[in-house]
Amino acid sequence: MAFTLWNDQIIEEGSITVSPEDRGYQFGDGIYEVVKVYNGQMFTAQEHIDRFYASADKIRLVIPYTKDVLHKLLHDLIEANNLENGHVYFQITRGAVSRNHVFPDASVPAVLTGNVKVGERAIENFQNGVKATLVEDIRWLRCDIKSLNLLGAVLAKQEASEKGCYEAILHRGDTVTECSSANVYGIKDGTLYTHPANNFILNGITRQVILKCAAEIGLPVIEEAMTKEELLNMDEIIVSSVSSEVTPVIDVDGHAIGTGAVGEWTRKLQAAFEAKLPISVNS
């Protein structure tokens, strides 16, 4: 039997009824987070919860629970489902009320939901690398908010999928931003480059861990936007997210990156990242 989170309760999956006038359903008026679970333990849970509340503040949505209560609810959800390896997803919307673009009265309660998904690490991708494609970034201008409004990202990811690629690397004009569901980095002459954490990208929690890993292994970091040409001429490219961890990109639109194989700095970053996980290395 599977269980889901419904506000402050853990209940049987399938017993939730979403109102057709829920603002998340009608407007995408809400935010979400995804936390990776390894061996039954959430990785960087507090960082994800902190960002959840930060996103809520940016859209003026009041979360009716403290961070500690939310953390406990997520822990209970994982335990109820006996989840060992996978993800816990949670979101909150501004609630259900007669359709109106204007925010509802403060008396309308927000709606919190969450569920888990079983999934193992993508070891083959980490070891062998993946392909990516360049796609124009047509999303809105507040990508720093982890909003439910994901249509632009969905369209980009679909285009990548139809081309047989793992990810879509997004660009606004000539400037590379991030991916459809990940951050992107280039490594050139022993320096790691990535877009600065502003409104054009989501400051990924995994991104933040990777920047710490780079410092630990002596890899200098420059947070500076790349052009498409600069990206294609990098020695190594990686993408990162909760699921992707440190995934090497060895090909972009048929153009081999570096030697066309996973690079040495990528391997070092992977090792430093894995050392922080509650797992046995290479598990």
Image: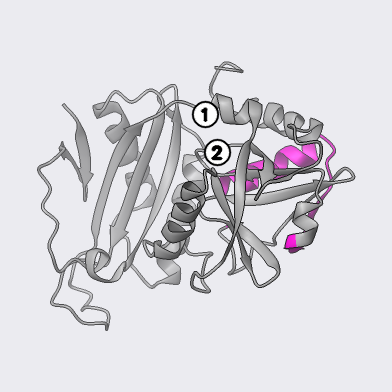
Residue 53 visible in rendering:
no
Q: Is residue 100 above or below residue 116?
A: below
Local crowd size for mark 2, using a 10 Å CA cut-off: few (<14), some (14–19), many (≥20): many
Q: Residue 64 in the image: x percent, y percent? A: 28, 59
Residue 251: quarter of image: top right
Q: Is residue 139 left or right of residue 203?
A: left
Q: How is the image coloured?
A: one colour
Q: Residue 85 in the image: x percent, y percent? A: 41, 25
Quarter of the C terminus within the rendering: top right
Q: How far separated are the C-alphas under marks 1 and 2? A: 7 Å
Say which element carries label 2.
Answer: loop
Residue 49 visible in rendering:
yes
Q: Amino acid at mark 1?
A: Ala
Q: Residue 119 in the image: x percent, y percent? A: 40, 29
Q: Residue at x 21, y 39 (%)?
A: 4
Q: Is residue 247 above or below residue 83?
A: below
Q: Residue at x 51, y 51 (%)?
A: 160
Q: Residue at x 83, y 41 (%)?
A: 219
Q: Is residue 76 above or below residue 229?
A: above
Q: Would residue 20 be counted in the magenta stretch? A: no
Quarter of the N terminus within the rendering: top left
Tell me the number on the disc at residue 122: 1
Q: Residue 255 in the image: x percent, y percent? A: 72, 47
Q: What range of the chain is rendered magenta?
A: 203-228
Q: Amino acid at mark 2?
A: Ser
Say which element carries label 1.
Answer: loop
Q: Are marks 1 and 2 in contact (CB under 8 Å)?
A: yes
Q: Which residue is mark 2?
A: 244
Q: Residue at x 28, y 45 (%)?
A: 114
Local crowd size for mark 1, using a 10 Å CA cut-off: few (<14), some (14–19), many (≥20): few
